[in-house]
Amino acid sequence: MPTLLVFLKYPTPGKVKTRLAAHIGDQRAADLYREWIGLVLAQVQPLRASVRVVGFFDGGTQKDFAAWDSLVEQWLPQPESNLGYRLRAGFEFAHSGGGPVAAIGTDCLEVDAALLQTAFDILKDKDAVFGPALDGGYYLVGTARPLVGFFDGIPWSSHTTLDAHLSSCRKHNWSFGLLPARSDIDTWEDWLAYCDGKVDRP
């Protein structure tokens, strides 16, 4: 069965969306992020008949995430390390259950069930799939099967993250597909752009 890993942090003021908080304050940023968790999880619900949704959490205990229990099949704590290690750990866990795996965060509010289904459809024919973010990273990454070294040597949180990962795929002869580009929300300007343009976004 396919697995969707949803990376999320507990919305503690001062611990989440710090670049956004620099403009609107820690509490307001945390409140917005809490709303985004609920929104993203709600938007993936149509997939749950055929996809296992796992909340891959950080910044709290599983009990802290109880408000969203009904929106996931299970919770899995993230290990303490860099993003590459956490991705690798999450994918190893998910692939152990069989089927393709995709991961998203809770910063891109334009991710919905239709887009995710497209990602899993791509994984029927490709080794990997990426959802390019406009900042040079990606809002989604997925693999059809375990790929040894897939998350190694990638410059995380960089404007070259996606390009570097695609280069790695080419080096290892891993085929990949790309989803439409979307925006992450990291700053106040990102949030305003989303609010202004979400209705007309394709």
Image (cartoon, helix red, strand yellow):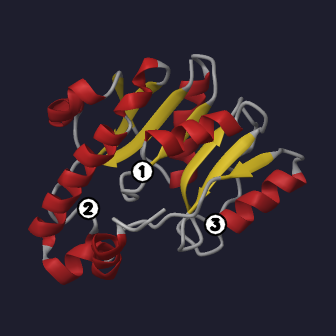
Q: In this view, does 155 lie above or below 51?
A: below
Lower sequence index among marks 2 and 3: 2
The residue at the point 50 percent across, 64 percent down is 182
* Residue for badge 1: 105
| Mark seen at residue 26 | none
Spot occupied by residue 175 in the image (x, y as percentages of width and height): 83, 45
The residue at the point 43 percent across, 18 percent down is 49
Q: Is residue 133 above or below residue 109?
A: below
Q: How many marks?
A: 3
Crowd rating for badge 3 (residues with CA inside 10 Å; few <14, some 14–19, many 20+): some
Q: Identify the element where label 1 is drawn.
A: loop
Lower sequence index among marks 3 and 1: 1
* Residue for badge 3: 161
Spot occupied by residue 5 in the image (x, y as percentages of width and height): 46, 36
Amino acid type for the residue under numbered disc 2: Val
Q: Is residue 197 above or below residue 94?
A: below
Q: Identify the element where label 3 is drawn.
A: helix
* Residue for badge 2: 16
Quarter of the image containing the N terminus? top right
Q: Identify the element where label 2 is drawn.
A: loop
- Nearer the observer, 108 or 147: 108
